[in-house]
Image (tube, helix red, strand yellow):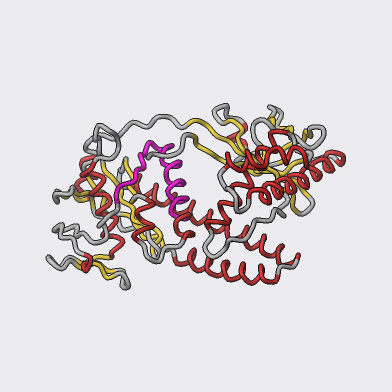
Amino acid sequence: MSGPEYFRRTAVTRLAVEADDRERLLSMVREWKRGCQIAVNVAWEVCHTRNEVQQLAYEKLRERTRLGSQHAVLATHRAAEAIKGALEREGDGTKPEFTSPTVVYDSRTLTLFDDRSISLTTTGDRVRCRLVFPDHGYQSQYLDDDRWEPAKSTLHYRDGEFHLHLGFRRPRPDVELPTEDATVLGVSLGIENLAVTSTARFFSGAELTHRHAEFTDLREDLRETNTRSARRTLRQADERMGNFTRNTLHEIAGEIISEAETHGCSVIAFGELEGVREMLERATPFHGRTFERLFEFVAYRSAERDITVVQVNPEYTSQRCTSCGFTHPQNRDVEANQFECLKCGNEANDDYNAAKNIGFRCIRRGPLSSRGVGAKYCALGSGRVTPDGEFIPNEDLEAVQKP
């Protein structure tokens, strides 16, 4: 698994909206929320996949709202996502309510013009308005590059102004599989340490877990209160938590990729996400979603740098000694986050030990293709090593790489 089919980016811009168009967009926001809520009400406790919700609710949206056909489809899809999210949140099971002033657009309901204006479908006539952002803003790199095409976007109304989170995508080029002497960076995922690399880079998960626990408690209190003010506070808290999680994961993903580049790695190996969740007794659905998003962020950003990202079977990687190969559950002290081999006495942080084993497993099993093309070395902080113990220190590597 080497990443998604497309690179995806989002450019946030303000919209310059005329007075008449403003009312059309506000009407669209209200109708969109109503349509999404109708779809949820119809599908709740019945189904939650996009196809199922669309089949069940589409005709009702066309009959009971002023949404066009494509926006009716998009509303059923948004409802399905909300229902699925509610079902996955631990201890939740509360039917979603659509109160946020947003509207989802796609390539059929949004048109981007060369003069940096945009046309948006509403419940009546289309609205055309100008994108507003700094002259040398980051948005230009997507608007001025023909390789990027408009994709699913979201209109937001806040503080009296309209903002567009304008989505872009471009096809991901084929990445050549690494040669057999390539180097792999192993990555272990966990609770206390969200990610640890085979080069001994540790990324703590404590703050994410703490903030999510606080948000969960707040959500329960506000839902019991269930006033308009409480629902507004909950929306704001949910948005803050989402932003913090997303920014944290993007930062960690960037650091993991930087670590791979620093050590000359053409492969980054994670443990299979489903297997990781099953092995971590304290993992919640939140941690499962966090692992998935981190993997996705690393995968799509690595593809731009010709780094292949894979998943390997994580079984026993936390119990196996990287020095002698002896595997036993008692090698690992979970509470102390410590690994000590009962056979040879090798000691290490248990997550770091697992990260090296993930790298070695990627090398041994060659998971990158049906032809078994894999890597030869696992990257360590001090150099690179093969599963058989052949070690090349960094100073020797640097000497070889000098012209």
Regarding residue 402, the answer to whether it shows in the image is no
Which quarter of the image is occupied by the C terminus?
A: top left
Residue 370 placement: quadrant: top left
Residue 66 position within the rendered picture, expressed as x and y whole percent measured from the top left: 79, 39
For residue 366, above or below residue 284 = above
Q: How many marks?
A: 0
Between residue 54 and residue 238, name the one nearer to us.
Answer: 54
Q: Is residue 298 magenta?
A: yes
Residue 288 placement: quadrant: bottom left
Query: Going 28% across and 40% down the picture, which residue do you hit?
Result: 367
Which quarter of the image is occupied by the N terminus?
A: top left
Horizontal side of residue 299 vs 24, given as left or right: left
Q: Which residues are magenta?
A: 290-313
For residue 193, above or below residue 66 = below
Q: Is residue 311 magenta?
A: yes
For residue 335, above or below residue 113 = below
Between residue 78 and residue 164, name the one nearer to us.
Answer: 78
Query: Going 40% across and 64% down the picture, which residue do you hit?
Result: 191
Residue 67 position within the rendered picture, expressed as x and y whole percent measured from the top left: 75, 38
Horizontal side of residue 214 vs 228, given as left or right: left
Residue 87 position within the rendered picture, expressed as x and y whole percent measured from the top left: 55, 56
Query: Going 47% across and 50% down the picture, which residue do you hit?
Result: 293
Residue 151 position within the rendered picture, expressed as x and y whole percent measured from the top left: 60, 35
Question: Given the current orientation, which residue lies at the most extreme front position?
Answer: 46
Regarding residue 157, the answer to whether it shows in the image is yes
Question: Given the current orientation, which residue lies at the most extreme right position?
Answer: 20
Query: Going 39% across and 47% down the picture, which residue do you hit?
Result: 257
